[in-house]
Image (cartoon, rainbow, N blue to C red):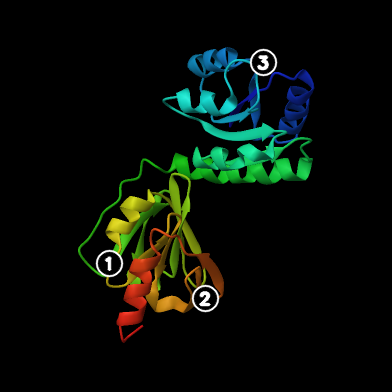
């Protein structure tokens, strides 16, 4: 994976470079002190992963990401925790607080590698069938998934995680599209990041529901519809 590090502090760039060199699957192709330098590097070469600070002179890291039409995977590296929500709303892979510990950096890179592998498989086509199952793309193949076996679905940036009792599948998909594929007679959107199979719901309240021991938050925009279905369907 080709990487770029963007930070106005040379010491911060030194740390990122040192950490990247410990990962043979990563190659640091550019160190940038300004957003313009990073933009030029992104325009000139293929970049898979971007490490960038948020508080920088001129253009902030948040605005820089917003300005990019074709974004690489990116990880924020900053001393300011208050930007975490903004970072994840932009679909950052991770948000690392300075001073960055190496083990925390490793976890972020592992996430990035997982995203990268999924992205490599994104050119596999997907077939939607009017049946009791769908096909989803993962690991360079189409996998048949029965609706009745899906416990819940979780948003994962531009991907979703589909959880079963014994495994999970990660596939390139938006939550909106995934929701449209799943039958409403069985599934409910309970949060912007979660869809649950109501047959696997063990318990629920006005703030969360529990699916196979996993506590899932209840979003205020989805709560009423879910509670109505759960309280009026005699089979659930």
Q: Residues within 10 Å of mark 2 (few under 14, many from 20)?
A: some
Q: Which residue is pictured at 58% across the width and 32% down the height? A: 1
Residue in front for this viewpoint, 185 or 171: 185
Q: Which residue is pictured at 78% across the width and 28% down the height? A: 15
Q: Which residue is mark 2?
A: 212
Is residue 105 positioned above or below 8 on the image? below
Of marks 1 and 2, which one's residue comes earlier in the chain?
Answer: 1
Q: Decide: marks 3, 2 in contact (CB < 8 A)?
A: no
How many marks on residues? 3
Q: Which residue is mark 3?
A: 33
Q: Which residue is pictured at 45% across the width and 76% down the height? A: 201
Q: Is residue 176 left or right of residue 98?
A: left
Q: Decide: marks 1, 2 in contact (CB < 8 A)?
A: no
Q: Residues within 10 Å of mark 1 (few under 14, many from 20)?
A: few
Residue in front for this viewpoint, 167 or 108: 108
Q: Is residue 135 left or right of residue 192?
A: left
Q: Secondary structure at mark 3?
A: loop
Q: Find residue 128 and report its horizontal and vertical position in percent.
A: 25, 56
Is residue 66 positioned above or below 33 on the image? below
Q: CA distance from mark 1 to mark 3?
A: 50 Å
Query: Residue 183: which disc?
Result: 1
Q: Is residue 20 left or right of residue 228?
A: right
Of marks 3 and 2, which one's residue comes earlier in the chain?
Answer: 3
Q: Secondary structure at mark 2?
A: loop
Residue extending farthest left: 130
Q: Which residue is pictured at 65% across the width and 21% down the height? A: 56
Of marks 1 and 3, which one's residue comes earlier in the chain?
Answer: 3
Is residue 163 positioned above or below 236 on the image? above
Q: Find residue 73 and report its horizontal and vertical position in percent.
A: 53, 34
Q: Find residue 218 and report its horizontal and vertical position in percent.
A: 47, 64
Q: Secondary structure at mark 1?
A: loop
Q: Looking at the rendering, which quadrant does residue 190 occupy?
A: bottom left
């Amino acid at each position: 994976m080709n990487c770029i590090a963007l930070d106005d502090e040379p010491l911060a760039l030194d740390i990122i470079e040192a950490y990247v060199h410990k990962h043979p699957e990563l190659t640091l192709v550019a160190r940038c002190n300004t957003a313009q330098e990073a933009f030029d590097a992104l325009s000139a070469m293929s970049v898979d992963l971007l490490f960038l600070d948020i508080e920088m002179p001129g253009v902030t890291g948040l605005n820089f990401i917003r300005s990019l039409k074709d974004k690489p995977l990116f990880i924020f590296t900053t001393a300011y925790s208050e930007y975490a929500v903004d970072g994840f709303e932009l679909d950052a892979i991770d948000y690392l607080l300075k001073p960055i510990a190496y083990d925390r950096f490793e976890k972020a890179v592992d996430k990035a590698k997982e995203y990268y592998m999924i992205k490599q498989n994104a050119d596999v086509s997907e077939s939607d069938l009017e049946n009791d199952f769908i096909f989803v793309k993962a690991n360079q193949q189409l996998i048949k998934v029965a609706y009745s076996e899906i416990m819940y679905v979780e948003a994962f940036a531009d991907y979703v995680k589909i959880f079963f009792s014994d495994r999970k599948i990660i596939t390139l998909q938006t939550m909106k599209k995934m929701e449209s594929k799943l039958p409403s007679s069985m599934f409910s959107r309970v949060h912007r990041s979660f869809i649950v199979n109501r047959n696997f719901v063990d318990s629920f309240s006005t703030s969360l529901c529990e699916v196979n021991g996993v506590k899932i938050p209840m979003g205020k925009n989805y709560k009423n519809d879910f509670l109505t279905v759960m309280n009026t369907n005699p089979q659930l």
